[in-house]
Amino acid sequence: MSVNTAAMTEKVDWRKYFTWNTDHKVIGIQYLVTTFFFFIVGGALAMLVRTELGQPGTDLLDGVEYNRFLTNHGSVMIFLWIIPVLAGFGNYLIPLMIGARDMAFPNLNALSFWLIPPAGVLMIASFFVGSAESGWTAYVPLSVTAPLGQTLWAVSVIILGVSSLLGAINFVTTTLTMRAEGMGFWDLPLFVWGMLATALMILVATPMLTAGLILIALDRVAGTLFFDVAAGGDPVFWQNIFWFYSHPAVYIMILPGMGIISEIFPVFSRKPIFGYKAIAISSMAISVLGLTVWAHHMFTSGMNPALRIPYMITSMIIAVPTGIKIFSWLGTIWDGKLRFTTPMLFALGFISMFLIGGITGIFLASIPVDLHVHDTYFVVAHLHFVLFGGSVSAVYAGLYYWFPKITGRKYDERLGKVHFWMNFIGTNLSYLPMFLAGLLGMPRRVVDYAPEFTGVNQLATVGAYLLGLSTLPFLYNAIVSWARGPRAESNPWRALTLEWTTSSPPPEHNFDERPVMKIWPYSYGEVEVESEATGPVASAGD
Amino acid sequence: MESNAALHKQEFKAGHQLGLDHKKLGMWLFLSSEVMFFGGLISAFLHFKINTPSPAESALLDVALIGVNTFILLTSSFTVVLGLAAIQRGNSRALAGYLGLTILLGAVFLTGQVYEFKMLYQEGMTLQSSVYGSSFYTLTGFHGLHVLIGVVWAVFVLVNALRGRYAENEHGGVEIFGLYWHFVDIVWIVLFTIIYLV
């Protein structure tokens, strides 16, 4: 208790967040806040795109502007929001969850963060010098012929890749070498497992994108001929390189989220996680299998037809480890004592929406279906159900779940629920109609559309505005609660992972005494959990 | 109270139980990503070499010159090994000598590569002459960049050695540099094979 009061009276010096600081908790907050800023930028771009699509015709943006807005929307959301925000969680949580003082390489960690703001500035600056306009996929020849901004875009994505790689080196090394005494691999929290699988995937996949972007940049600035068809260059080669990275990137964007969800379900169901090893191993299985499926994005790119079948099969096999996770989560909440807090609601929202995204992924992996719906709004709907319904829900779940730990304050539960419902309804309203539009044949990435698609597009646009509005209660809640919310005790959720055994927020050195792992982190209902809120000792099974 | 940095050093018990040194592990992870980076450039080179060959240009390559260069680079790996063995016996002067030799050999390799590029450019094979030229210069150029970084790194290790920063049981810095240098060497063996021999 004395520790807690000490932490409470300590005045937060916000200036440290603007400096080179090697404390992983400071870096974690730097990541979370910076990337949320880019989330808002990406969201604003999405809303402009949806406004243009509110009715047929080109009334707000012309074709070129439309391409630029949608390119930057996708690039900002993927490279500056989802991938780094999850690294932010990893930064803040991994050392705390494994009982370490800091990351293995604190200075490298600070560098990983400080690469992000300049890369973000480069990407946004590209807007003003003739923006990138070839989509986040940067397909050639579009990305070679695009104006100067596309070069800045490529440099920005290379820098973000380096940041992500350095982070991955840190995550793996920290997890392997800095675990608390008594913590074996089968005692690792599932979020840490998720980050480990993600980091290994980043190490294998991201350098490939770096190599590919260098080829594009050289074609643009040095006159090389890699993608010049007249000289024997090969645009499909870019697609292979790009998807070798970018399909695994989907798992890079979802595995940490699945880890977050796996922490939340047992706590709010007061039950041990169902199938701990199965969830951990399935993360690793996804990270290996995920490297073997990339060409399912290229069924219509004129690839050798005989090669389609193996890619279809491997893509469908990924449904197995994913299904194992989903059934394990359902097994965890089954017959549990559920508490519908905001993080739990977002976790449940994650399952329902990610399921739609995942299952439509199977549709798309099937060659005949893909030939029909490739490059239609069906793909847009699928991707957004995975990344918005899935990853973003998981990020919100995590932000609410660890808010008391990170800030030392409690958030407003009522506002949290308002946020959840706006977000949940907005997501479904935005993206469900897109499935219909896609099946009816509406192509994606086109500024205009035939009048018969007006109805579904208007629904999607209303949904997008609702999603935009839904960030307001979150921002208000986060800012006001951080400034003057009620103090949070060290373990408000009565959770068993190690980060809850230290004060909220944790002291600079994380733990006053080196933690020793004694209780398996998912022994809910089997051991007693100390909680200041409900008296000195409460049964975890309550 | 002990400094944060000193306490941080004591944090790696779990790693020691697995026989892992955190700095070496970090280097290995970095090198694994480098394997994939070169994998991307190598696949580009092979793809274009096989599907859009440029026999006139590949005939220009001077296998004998680059063979000698390859031998020089391999020797530089050997001198790093000798340097590490020297400091493991506590001989920091010998380490400095071998590092100096490594730097020299690395510089000779780079000079050879620049000379080769110059000759090829005079013969008309350039970055823009064909896809083969583009992928040849990109692949060998990025390898050369790695050698250059290694040479600069070796200079730092040499300065540390001269200042007596390394000892019999304190030579992690040399070892980690060695891992990188050997990696750059191994990549060259692959490149030499696929570019000049096959």
Image (cartoon, coloured by chain):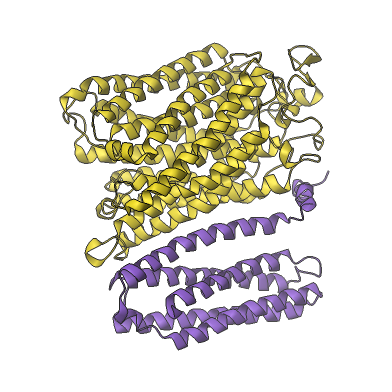
The x, y position of residue A449, in whole percent, is 19, 30
- Residue A431 at least partly seen: yes
The x, y position of residue A303, in whole percent, is 32, 53
The x, y position of residue A406, in whole percent, is 63, 28
Q: In the figure, is residue A134 to the left or right of A114?
A: left
Tell me the residue at 66%/41% (across/down). A23
Q: Colour of chain A?
A: yellow
Q: Nearer the viewer, residue A372 or A33?
A: A372
The x, y position of residue B137, in whole percent, is 39, 72
Is A241 above or below relative to A316? Answer: below
Q: Colour of chain B?
A: purple
Q: Quadrant of residue B178?
A: bottom right
Q: In the figure, is residue A330 to the left or right of A387?
A: right
Tell me the residue at 52%/29% (across/down). A395
Is A218 above or below relative to A246? Answer: below
Q: In the figure, is residue B131 to the left or right of A341?
A: left
Q: Nearer the viewer, residue A148 or A263?
A: A263
Total marks in image: 0
Tell me the residue at 62%/48% (across/down). A170
Q: In the figure, is residue A350 to the left or right of B158?
A: left
On-image quarter of the N terminus of chain A: top right
On-image quarter of the C terminus of chain A: top right
Q: Nearer the viewer, residue A96 or B8?
A: A96
Which residue ends up furthest to the bottom in the rendered image?
B64
- Residue A30 at least partly seen: no
